[in-house]
Amino acid sequence: MTGEIATRARSTSDLSDNEHHLIARAQRGDSAALSAIYDEYAEKIYIYFYHRLGDRQLAEDLTGEVFVRVVEAADTPRFADTSLSGWLYRIAHNLLVDYFRQRREEVTLTEGLSMDSEGPAALAERKLAQDRLRQALESLTEDQRQVIVLRFGEGLTAREVAEIMGKKENAIWQLQHRALNGLRRALEGAPA
């Protein structure tokens, strides 16, 4: 129990003044504060879902659900006890877990192809590289994939990932190490 209190105190003290102010305003029902939270984090949460699901519509729906839950929980003490990004990603993580429990589908980690100014050869090469990476990621455990997506796809710190996944920071470093080794082995063994 003492560790939990210390963790909460540390998390709360690490919040920026801007986050404290934004959270306090949101707790008072300030719709502008809730809009600011949405503006700051919606795209990041959407990308997190899209990287995990490969489905734009589903990513949009789940992103919307994250912010519905933010509005519902804005006046609870839990809202003020953690970093805003950590809390939002934790909600997103829990929604993904619920989704996959309901659907019993495998996780697919794909990115949409950009049709910008790439020629057919560059597009084909990019698609092949994405397929190789997706296959390599699928060879990892769910926790290892989650760490890779959050650390490298979302740019979060190991501490933030630990908070989101409900694990200790050392466990995140171990998962990351094993995941990177697994990816290296999978990509070295994959045909070019």
Image: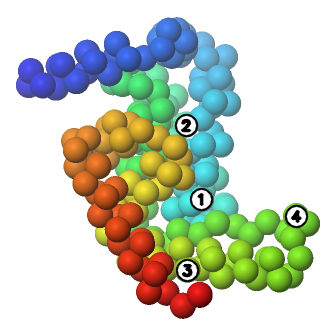
For disc 3, the neighbor class at 10 Å (few under 14, some 14 to 19, many from 20) is some
From the top left corner, tell me how far across and down residue 51 is, in percent: 56, 60
- Closest to the camera, between mark 1 and mark 4, is 4
Q: Residue sitting at 61 percent across and 17 percent down?
A: 33
Circle 2 residue: 67
Q: CA distance from mark 1 to mark 4?
A: 19 Å
Q: Residue sitting at 67 percent across and 30 percent down?
A: 39
For the residue marked with disc 3, what is the amino acid? Arg
For the residue marked with disc 4, what is the amino acid? Asp
For disc 4, the neighbor class at 10 Å (few under 14, some 14 to 19, many from 20) is few
Instruction: Give the mark count.
Output: 4
For the residue marked with disc 2, what is the amino acid? Phe
Q: CA distance from mark 3 to mark 4?
A: 22 Å
Callouts 4 and 2 close, C-beta under 8 Å = no
SS at mark 2 in the image: helix
Q: CA distance from mark 1 to mark 2?
A: 16 Å
For the residue marked with disc 1, what is the amino acid? Tyr
Instruction: Work out whether mark 3 precedes mark 1 in sequence or the reverse, and give the earlier one.
Output: 1
Circle 3 residue: 132
Q: Which mark is residue 116?
A: 4
Instruction: Choose top left, top right, bottom left or bottom right for residue 163.
Output: top left
Circle 1 residue: 50
Q: Is residue 89 above or below residue 87?
A: below
SS at mark 4 in the image: loop
Q: Is residue 119 visible?
A: yes
From the top left corner, tell me how far across and down residue 125 is, in percent: 73, 80
